[in-house]
Image (spheres, coloured by chain):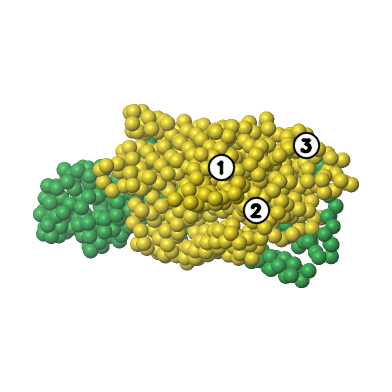
Chain colours: A green, B yellow
């Protein structure tokens, strides 16, 4: 008896510990957590993410209650009905079932499902069927193997990897509506603090929207496996104050800076295959396979966020992309050191 | 030389030359031997898939780790997933079904013994084909490689443009071939259960294990078919210039998703229903009570099977379906929780008022109930499609389905091993090693898969070979990896137990657990053709009737 007691006590203790562990998701998350590097789904900064977080907490509470009730039943039956030496090997009463009880534990879950479904359907409708208001910004996001292309059709801007959008005042909302396309495989646009993820699927245009209510840089990355470098298809969304966004738009609309000092670098760029894949506005380079470089220096990162946009990283990236992002589709051009320095200097004038 | 050796008296089969013995195993059509072949081959692949998992976990221990290259990492998770689902979980469950169903329904073999052997060897060949890709993936052109397109092989990543060479072809052929094996076994199980039950065993007197495997086999027929069709379409795309999934030529990537998930979601239930079957046999015996609500358990299973055929697109909430489709699949997915909940309640009802014996098999079963409960509840969370827009494709989903597959299916399987190993080998598994195995695996499991939910909530996508520092993912991933190694140690204990007990375990006798179904009425291991005289039954628990002639079940049914 004591041995049995001990093992079931141990069992109960263990289970209590597990309960603690399984509650982990609840306590690990600090709402309104860090800004900047945060990617928690429970730190929403825009309406879709907020409605999702709200319905999620509702579902968490309901499922948490179900867990506690069923777990208590399970624990009670394991402890209370453990075999004892005093039983003397007699069999317990043989019970075959009870229709009333079966009905009860069929109907109650059905009612819970109805409640959960109605709460969910409301949020689905609110997010998916939201009409696009007149003041909305339109952006086309195009997934490429391991980088993002962003086009602002009404503003005539093409950029890559770092999306700039205006902050949205709840009283005068200026949401951003994204049209999602892909030129190769499937990708998924996921910035957890701004919205749930939506896939970019070739030949299957999708749509999503967000209306961020605080400024800052929001992190995300490709969530749908898209090939070798899926891990480094990072994504950042800069939410700017209206005037900062206006200034950014103004700067992006300009053609590339022409600097006579780096003409050698420009020639290297245009003589080699660089210009087959990359565009520089206002020059003959109009490739579309790789990111648009017209305002490369306005971006904080290169290689879809895989490296910071510094002189050394940029040089390394052009010299040997595999050193930063093995499997990336940018080839090593095998430039001489002189050509390499020249082309890096050219890149560094593209503000 | 052999003439010198052979002085073996008739009947002492152990001393046969090993070539003879091997030949017998290779050509056998005996359901028990095929069952064991299925199980052993699955254990082999379990170890291989486990090593792949460990490689994944080492790589993810901290951010920007360089243990393996991205290419190798992508191959590892592709092979890990494919191996564990198609060459571990399916075969091991088919193995138990093969072994147990005829014994439990009082039949002498499966309905089609040769089809049975054919199906096993097809499945096994599928596994070999998959692993041959490591050598032959690039054909004659260079070093080989395994498929790296993920085990869903989403279009158009599986197209030739994005997956050159033959690695994807080995993946396709492996699934196609083993799929035909699964269809053969499913037909066999259905025919056996419908046609070979012993006298008196009406459908409503069948052990639940037989009932649930019947449902499972029916689902295999429905689910494997679209998978096979999709694989053939993919081959047509790759080699005959088809455009089913070729998005550049007007094909549809979404079509592949539908095909794949309309197979794969029922597949989850194909895997879990036989585990429900184990639970429905083990829990009553160790609670010393009959299963609570037998007819409701059968009805709930059939209900799960039906509803689970209409939930597949909950894997596709992020692909941009319209709000009505998202609502529909939210509803059906939540609805499947109702019959599943009924099952959990009935198992608790079975334990209620019983005298529970905490043998290792029962410990695994109780842990199953606990973990399956959590897996079901996280499933409800993701059924809520807005919640899923955040959780889908993240580590939360990875934690959820490992909770189902490891916390549910694998725990149930371990229970089944401890429960039926004595019947299969005639020897008991060591309870002492069993306790070590159970507690180590339990701790490792919870360390890994409880913690794994959190990086998902913190925005970590799945299938990334490395991640950025500063997102709060490092420590969590380290804990997850440590748990994986504890699980690996537990598996080693388990394998040691299987081997040591085979030679040194206590003799089991016919009926070590004082159980009630027909397999315990014959010797351990059962003789060829199982029953010298075909038994006649008059209730769901024939051995209970035999042991308690004063109070037989047949009086109440």
Q: Earlier in the sequence, mark 3 or mark 2?
A: 2
Residue B536 — which label?
3
Residue B332 — which label?
none
Residue A1 is drawn in which quadrant? bottom right
Tag 2 near tag 1, CB within 8 Å = no
- Residue A170 placement, left or right of B509: left
Q: Which residue shows up at 82% across the image and 45% down it?
A: B546
SS assignment at label 2? loop
Q: Which residue is mark 1?
A: B34
Nearer the observer, B7 or B321: B7
Numbered disc 2: what chain? B
Q: Which residue is mark 2?
A: B426
Nearer the observer, B287 or B15: B15
Work out whether disc 3 and disc 1 sit on a shared chain. Answer: yes
**Circle 2 or circle 1, nearest the eye:** 2
Residue A349 showing in the rendered view: no
Q: How far is the residue under mark 2 from the one under mark 1?
A: 17 Å
Q: Which residue shows up at 32% across the image and 37% down it?
A: B160
Category of crowding for the residue at label 2, using alpha-carbon neighbours closer than 10 angstroms: few (below 14), some (14–19), many (at least 20): many
Q: How far is the residue under mark 3 from the one under mark 2?
A: 25 Å
Say if B109 sits above or below A251 in the image: above
Please provide percent x and percent y for residue B426. Answer: 65, 53
Q: Which residue shows up at 34% across the image and 28% down it?
A: B240
Residue B356 showing in the rendered view: yes
SS assignment at label 1? helix
Q: How far is the residue under mark 3 from the one under mark 1?
A: 26 Å
Q: In the orientation shown, which residue stands out farthest toward the right?
A: B550
Please provide percent x and percent y for residue B428. Answer: 65, 58
Q: Which residue shows up at 71% across the image and 34% down it?
A: B197
Category of crowding for the residue at label 3, using alpha-carbon neighbours closer than 10 angstroms: few (below 14), some (14–19), many (at least 20): few
């Amino acid at each position: 008896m004591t041995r049995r007691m001990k093992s079931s006590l141990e069992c109960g203790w263990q289970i209590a510990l597990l309960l603690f562990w399984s509650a982990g998701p609840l306590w690990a998350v600090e709402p309104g957590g860090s800004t900047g590097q945060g990617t928690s789904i429970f730190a929403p900064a825009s309406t879709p993410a907020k409605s999702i977080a709200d319905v999620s907490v509702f579902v968490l509470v309901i499922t948490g209650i179900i867990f506690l009730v069923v777990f208590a039943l399970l624990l009670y039956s394991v402890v209370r009905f453990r075999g004892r030496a005093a039983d003397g090997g007699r069999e317990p009463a043989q019970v075959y079932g009870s229709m009333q009880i079966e009905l009860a534990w069929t109907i109650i879950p059905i009612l819970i499902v109805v409640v959960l479904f109605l709460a969910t359907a409301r949020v689905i409708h609110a997010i998916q069927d939201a009409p696009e208001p007149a003041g909305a910004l339109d952006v086309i996001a195009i997934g490429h193997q391991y980088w993002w292309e962003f086009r602002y059709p009404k503003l005539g801007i093409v950029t890559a990897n770092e999306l700039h959008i205006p902050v949205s005042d709840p009283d005068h909302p200026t949401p951003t509506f994204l049209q999602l396309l892909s030129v190769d495989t499937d990708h998924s646009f996921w910035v957890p603090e701004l919205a749930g993820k939506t896939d970019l699927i070739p030949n299957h245009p999708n749509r999503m929207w967000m209306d961020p209510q605080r400024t800052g840089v929001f992190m995300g990355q490709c969530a749908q496996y898209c090939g070798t470098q899926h891990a480094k298809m990072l994504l950042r969304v800069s939410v700017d104050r209206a005037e900062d966004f206006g200034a950014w738009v103004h700067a992006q609309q300009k053609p590339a800076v022409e600097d006579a000092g780096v003409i050698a670098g420009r020639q290297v760029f245009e003589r080699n295959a660089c210009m087959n894949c990359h565009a520089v506005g206002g020059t003959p380079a109009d490739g579309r396979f790789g990111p648009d470089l017209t305002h490369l220096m306005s971006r904080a990162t290169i290689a879809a966020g895989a490296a910071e946009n510094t002189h050394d990283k940029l040089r390394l990236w052009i010299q040997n992309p595999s050193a930063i992002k093995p499997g990336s589709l940018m080839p090593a051009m095998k430039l001489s050191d002189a050509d390499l320095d020249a082309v890096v200097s050219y890149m560094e004038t593209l503000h | 030389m052999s003439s010198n050796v052979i002085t073996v008296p008739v009947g002492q089969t152990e001393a046969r030359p090993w070539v003879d013995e091997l030949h017998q195993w290779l050509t056998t059509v005996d359901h028990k031997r095929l069952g064991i072949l299925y199980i052993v081959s699955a254990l082999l692949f379990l170890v291989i898939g486990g090593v792949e998992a460990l490689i994944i976990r080492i790589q993810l221990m901290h951010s920007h780790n360089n243990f393996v290259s991205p290419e190798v990492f992508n191959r590892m998770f592709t092979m890990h997933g494919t191996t564990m689902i198609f060459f571990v979980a399916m075969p091991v469950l088919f193995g138990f079904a093969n072994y147990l169903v005829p014994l439990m329904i009082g039949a002498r073999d499966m309905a089609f013994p040769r089809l049975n052997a054919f199906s096993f060897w097809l499945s096994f060949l599928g596994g070999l084909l998959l692993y041959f890709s490591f050598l032959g993936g690039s054909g004659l052109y260079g070093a080989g490689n395994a498929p790296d397109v993920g085990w869903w092989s989403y279009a158009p990543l599986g197209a030739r443009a994005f997956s050159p060479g033959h690695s994807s072809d080995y993946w396709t052929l492996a699934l196609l071939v083993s799929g035909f094996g699964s269809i053969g076994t499913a037909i066999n199980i259905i025919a056996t259960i419908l046609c070979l039950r012993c006298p008196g065993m009406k459908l409503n007197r069948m052990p639940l294990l037989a009932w649930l495997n019947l449902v499972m086999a029916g689902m295999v027929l429905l689910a494997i078919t679209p998978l096979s069709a999709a694989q053939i379409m993919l081959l047509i795309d790759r080699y005959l210039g088809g455009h089913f999934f070729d998005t550049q030529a007007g094909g549809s990537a979404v079509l592949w998703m539908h095909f794949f998930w309309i197979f794969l979601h029922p597949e989850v239930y194909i895997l879990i229903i036989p585990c429900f079957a184990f639970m429905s046999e083990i829990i009553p015996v160790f609670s010393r009570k009959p299963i609570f609500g037998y007819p409701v358990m059968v009805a709930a299973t059939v209900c799960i099977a039906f509803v689970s055929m209409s939930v597949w697109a909950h894997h596709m909430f992020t692909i941009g379906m319209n709000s009505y489709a998202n609502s529909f699949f939210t509803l059906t997915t939540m609805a499947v929780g109702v019959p599943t909940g009924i099952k959990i309640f009935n198992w608790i009802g079975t334990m209620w008022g019983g005298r529970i014996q905490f043998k290792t098999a029962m410990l695994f079963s109780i842990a199953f109930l606990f973990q399956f409960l959590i897996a079901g509840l996280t499933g409800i969370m993701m059924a809520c499609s807005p919640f899923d827009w955040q959780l889908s494709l993240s580590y939360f989903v990875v934690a959820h389905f490992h909770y189902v597959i490891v916390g549910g299916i694998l725990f149930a399987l371990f229970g089944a091993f401890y429960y039926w190993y004595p019947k299969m080998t005639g020897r008991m598994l060591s309870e002492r090693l069993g306790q070590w195995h159970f507690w180590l695996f339990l701790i490792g499991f919870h360390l890994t898969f409880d913690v794994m939910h959190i990086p998902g909530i913190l925005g970590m996508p799945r299938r990334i070979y490395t991640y950025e520092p500063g997102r709060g993912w490092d420590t969590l991933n380290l804990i997850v990896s440590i748990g994986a190694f504890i699980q690996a140690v537990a598996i080693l204990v388990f394998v040691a137990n299987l081997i040591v007990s085979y030679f040194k375990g206590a003799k089991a006798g016919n009926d070590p657990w004082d159980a009630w179904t027909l397999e315990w009425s014959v010797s351990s291991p059962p003789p060829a053709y199982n029953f010298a005289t075909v038994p006649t039954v008059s209730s769901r628990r024939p051995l209970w009737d035999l042991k308690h002639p004063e109070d037989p079940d047949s009086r109440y049914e």
